[in-house]
Image: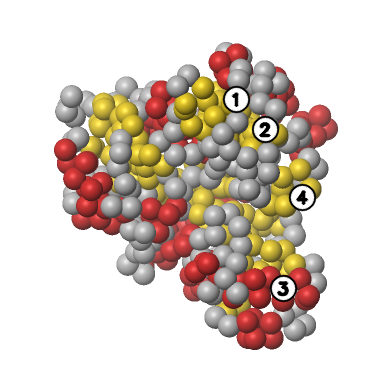
Amino acid sequence: MTETPNETNVLLIGSGGREHALAWALAASPQLGDFYAAPGNPGIFDYAVPTNLDTTDHPAVVAFCREKAIGLVVIGPEAPLVAGLADDLRASGLAVFGPDKAAARLEGSKGFTKDLCAEFHIPTGAYGRFTDAAAAKAYLAGKPMPIVVKADGLAAGKGVVIAANIAEAEAAIDACFEGAFGAAGSEVVIEEFLDGEEASFFALCDGDTAIAFGAAQDHKRVGDGDTGPNTGGMGAYSPAPVMTDAMIERTMREIIAPTVAGMKKRGTPFKGVLFAGLMITAKGPQLIEYNVRFGDPECQVLMMRLSSDLLAVLLAVAQGRLADAEISFSSDAALTVVMAAEGYPGTPRKGTEIHGLASAQSLEGVEIFHAGTMRDGERILAHGGRVLNVTAHAPTVAEAQARAYAAVDLIRWPEGFCRRDIGWRAVARERAGR
């Protein structure tokens, strides 16, 4: 089947839980025509046709899109964006959801983002950026502790150390320059530690217009009570109680709007989703960092709450029509629990079988998004660190939490684990009546 005037053929790039959630939401659109995924995962293939595309081979992706009359390419992860896939697709006349390479530097280089903040007066922590260890260590003198040391480039969710003292900060600097994070650590950003409550805030942008697209809070530490090493995220919930209407308005005015205007002024307009990692401080919202794609696992809870047609919204972004888009969210809360493989966030144990997914999925208000699985005949096997996102929606965070953990308890996977306290701050707020 080729694309018709009322249908849009879509290619989704990516293979994680974020992309499964996007596929689930896109599949609900009455506008969807043929739907392809590269590389995809067993959950995504419930909706999309698998392809053998090498997404690092940009001419091959362009050729595939022409052959299949693709009307929209949705790029899920950051690496293809930083590598310029959106540029090559747009140069061939294709509609793309995701920023060009120059705009993707907002995630690809932390120093780039900090310099943008300085130029356009966007609230963020004080910082310095360095290309050698000696200068970086000299910067530490007299600075209050704790302090944050970051590898400048993409480090797969790693490369950030909150150093309690100068010795820890110097060790983090040495790790970067000694190659612990590869090329990502060839430059280091050192920044002020911001005290407050973190939130993940999302805004859609078409180069000119920016519209708020929800907020969430995630849990980065691997263990209950926010203990243990940082991960890519062990769970999330939405909405974020700290992001009141007033705080959202202030974030759009003080952070998102000047970013969009600044990028346009520089000749690198941003088109896609801006994911602002915020710290809500006593002074108000301050930017910790930008990502240039949906968060994972925040995307999962946003998609569970989205009432609008996702395909129509993403097309409006890609075609510069965002001002006319209709965006609405359910008043329900959504919560996702990450089930991870034994060994994560170190070396995860792969190849173990997961049972009970159908029973868990059958519970009211529950969706299970595959993040790191593979299919072996009729069996679903673990094939990554973060393996499943057990997601639920309900009128309150507490009810969504109860539904999600009821589903978790129906999944039989002895080699997997999860946190048992996702959403604890919001649940405590609800119980306190705030």
Residue at image x 18%, y 36%? 69
| Residue density around tag 1, few if under 14, some if 14–19, many if 20 or more, within 10 Å | some
- Image coordinates of residue 187 in percent, x first then y, are 54, 75
Does residue 98 sit above or below 146 in this rendering? above
Q: Amino acid at mark 4?
A: Gly
Q: Nearer the viewer, mark 4 or mark 1?
A: 1
Q: CA distance from mark 3 to mark 2?
A: 32 Å
N-terminal-most mark, 1 or 2: 1
Mark carried by residue 171: 3
Q: Nearer the viewer, mark 1 or mark 3?
A: 1
Q: CA distance from mark 4 to mark 1?
A: 25 Å
Q: Amino acid at mark 1?
A: Ile
N-terminal-most mark, 2 or 4: 4
Mark carried by residue 416: 2
| Quadrant showing the N terminus | top left
Q: Amino acid at mark 2?
A: Gly
Locate residue 284: give its quadrant.
Answer: bottom right
- Image coordinates of residue 370 in percent, x first then y, are 52, 31
Residue at image x 18%, y 29%? 3
Instruction: Check disc 3 and report its element: helix, strand or loop.
Output: helix
N-terminal-most mark, 4 or 3: 3
User: Label 1 belongs to which residue?
Assistant: 354
Dot 3 and dot 2 residues touching (CB under 8 Å): no
Instruction: Check disc 1 and report its element: helix, strand or loop.
Output: strand
Q: CA distance from mark 4 to mark 3?
A: 19 Å
Locate residue 353: give its quadrant.
Answer: top right
User: Label 4 belongs to which residue?
Assistant: 228
| Quadrant showing the C terminus | top right
